[in-house]
Amino acid sequence: MVVADIIKLLDANVISNEIDMNHPVKTVCGSDMMSDVLAFIKKDAVLLTGLNNLQVLRTAEMMDIVCIVFVRGKTPSAEMVAMADELNIYMLQTQYTMFDTCGILYEAGLRGGRKVDG
Amino acid sequence: MDSIHYHYLVDGEDFARAGEASSSLKSKLKQLGFPPDVIRRCSIAIYEGEINMVIHADGGDIDVDIYPDKIVMVLKDKGPGIPDIDLAMQAGWSTAKEQILSLGFGAGMGLPNMKKSSDEMNVETEIGVGTTVTMTVNVPN
């Protein structure tokens, strides 16, 4: 799956000014807790979140997250958009809730980190 | 063995700016050509630590020494100290306030994740004086 597929599936708005539609994505993590994202997310991931602050981007930067999808129509600030462009992290926005966003991507074949160890 | 040394001052006043030291270190490790897994582990360890310093200790100092075979990160704060380290090391245990939870942190995953991400972690803490966390990430040959 690539970024363009995510946009289509989630009927998403592209928030970033720069985006690579053909960038591959392999896993998904849905969370509003960045601590959990830092503990559990895998490589080449999409992050689904309802949290809307600069730490979402910092977390994405640290974990090499490809793309952030803001659920429930959350709109990142202009400062976040500029930072995302600088960090080469793609930001999308969907009107779907977290649960439905997860369900749509799961149904399309994407998976998360499965069960947590121990 | 000589190391490359970096010092970062972590501002405890501004949560939005938390992570700037971690971001800077990550860029430097990339420039120096360390393997992606080493960079990832260092990034998680220092970022969790930096967030902890802002949330719990009003900031502090981070010193990083980069050797060819290891990266040593020392995070020192003058915060309240950790009364029970064993308890703080348990996943899910947290003293963070509601406001911190609403910012996406304070789930009690910080210290356990820092330990998991580093090869060695040492915590020295004294109540009312502060906490120093030293983490080493080894670079495989």
Image: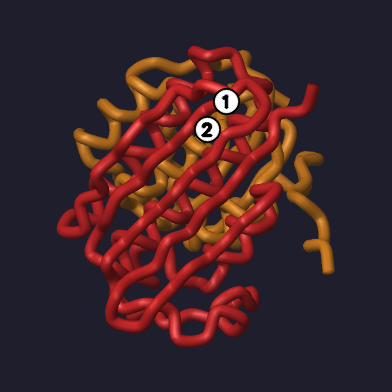
Picture layout, residue B92 above or below residue A4: below
- Asked whether, in this view, residue B114 is left or right of residue A69, the answer is right
Which residue is located at x 62 percent, y 14 percent? A22
In the rendered image, residue B121, in percent from the top left (x then y), is placed at 61, 57
To which residue does mark 1 refer?
Answer: B67
Q: Could you confirm whether marks 2 and 1 are on the same chain? A: no
> Are the residues at dot 2 and dot 1 in contact (C-beta closer than 8 Å)?
no
Q: CA distance from mark 2 to mark 1?
A: 32 Å
- Asked whether, in this view, residue A95 is left or right of residue A114, the answer is left
Which image quarter holds the N terminus of chain B? Answer: top right
Q: Chain of mark 1?
A: B
Q: Is residue A100 visible?
A: no
- Coloured how? by chain
- Asked whether, in this view, residue A47 is left or right of residue B38, the answer is left
In the rendered image, residue B19, in percent from the top left (x then y), is placed at 35, 44
Q: Which chain, by letter, is red?
A: B
Q: Nearer the viewer, residue A115 or A100?
A: A115
Tell me the colour chain A is drawn in.
orange
Judged from the image, the secondary structure of the residue bearing numbered disc 2 is: strand
Which image quarter holds the C terminus of chain B? Answer: top right
